[in-house]
Image (cartoon, rainbow, N blue to C red):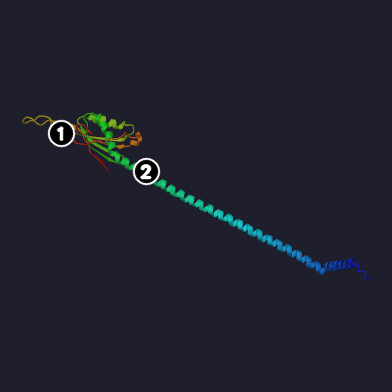
Amino acid sequence: MIKINLLHSVTERQGGAAVAVERKIASPVSRLMLMTMAVAFLLVAVIGWDVISTQMARTEAERQLEEQKQIAAQLESVLKEQKELEAKIQNIDLRIEAIKKLRASQAGPSAVLEAANERIRMTPGLYLESLEQAGEQVTIKGNSPDESAVTQFGRSLEFSGGLFSNLNIETQRKEVQSQTASAPAPGQEAPKLEIVNFTIRTAYTPSKAGAPKEMMPTTATNAAPAAPAAPQIAKN
């Protein structure tokens, strides 16, 4: 009977294979190839990681840039709306100011006439002929048989709390024929009456004396009682 030692044969084969591998590894060429492959693998890994990290950083930078662009666009839109709103507010303010000036210019003649009428009522024997207003400058013309009445009227304008200022009074005496006297006898002259014509120039500034009173329409009949000529208002 033939005996075969299989264990010994396997060990011998394995030992031969290990010896062959050791021989290949111990060879300088094999070691160089292994080191080259290891270095190449590490280099590829580093380059791959660098490319991937660079791509990720680029993607993040592009995302942040897009967010910044969106924020800038929103800010520009907000600034544009703010400018439009400021322009609208300025336009409204200009319209309000124009309306105030228009109302003041429309109420000006009535206010001047009312203020002058109040002082004429306190001065008996004073007759108003005309009242002209050009801006803040007011010219009042009239007459009176008593010069003291003209002086009293001028004082009432001067001491008006700033409503009338820069007062200038010009007076001129004039003789007129009396219409109430009876017909003169033959050879006698008709009696004459001396009157004082006056012209008052003054500045009318209601803002210096506060807000003017509530104005009511003033007619020519109540501007100067018993006046021979109705007062007229002319605004240039």
State whether residue 167 is above or below residue 66: above
- Looking at the rendered image, the disc whose residue lies closer to the viewer, 1 or 2, is 2
Q: Is residue 159 above or below residue 3?
A: above
**Relative image position of residue 213 (x, y in whole percent):** 32, 33
Front-lying residue, 168 or 93: 93
Q: How many marks?
A: 2
**Is any atom of residue 201 visible in this view?**
no
In the picture, the quarter occupied by the C terminus is top left
Q: Amino acid at mark 2?
A: Ile
Q: Is residue 79 visible?
A: yes
Disc number for residue 233? none
Q: Secondary structure at mark 1?
A: strand
Q: Residue at x 51, y 51 (%)?
A: 74
In the image: residue 65, left or right of residue 7: left
The N terminus: image quadrant: bottom right
The quarter holding residue 10 reads bottom right
Q: Amino acid at mark 1?
A: Val
Q: Can you tell which quarter of the image residue 127 is in?
A: top left
Q: Which residue is mark 2?
A: 96
Q: For mark 1, what is the residue? A: 176
Badge 2 element: helix
Residue 128, above or below 24: above
Between residue 85 and residue 190, name the one nearer to us: 85
Q: Is residue 14 left or right of residue 80?
A: right
Residue in the foreground of this view, choosing between 65 and 227: 65
Q: Extreme right residue here?
A: 1
Query: From the viewer's perspective, is 87 left or right of 119?
Result: right
Above/below status of 86 relative to 187: below
Tell me residue 27's x, y (percent): 83, 68
**Residue at the limit of the structure toward the front, as seen here:** 1
Locate residue 9, reporting x and y percent: 89, 68
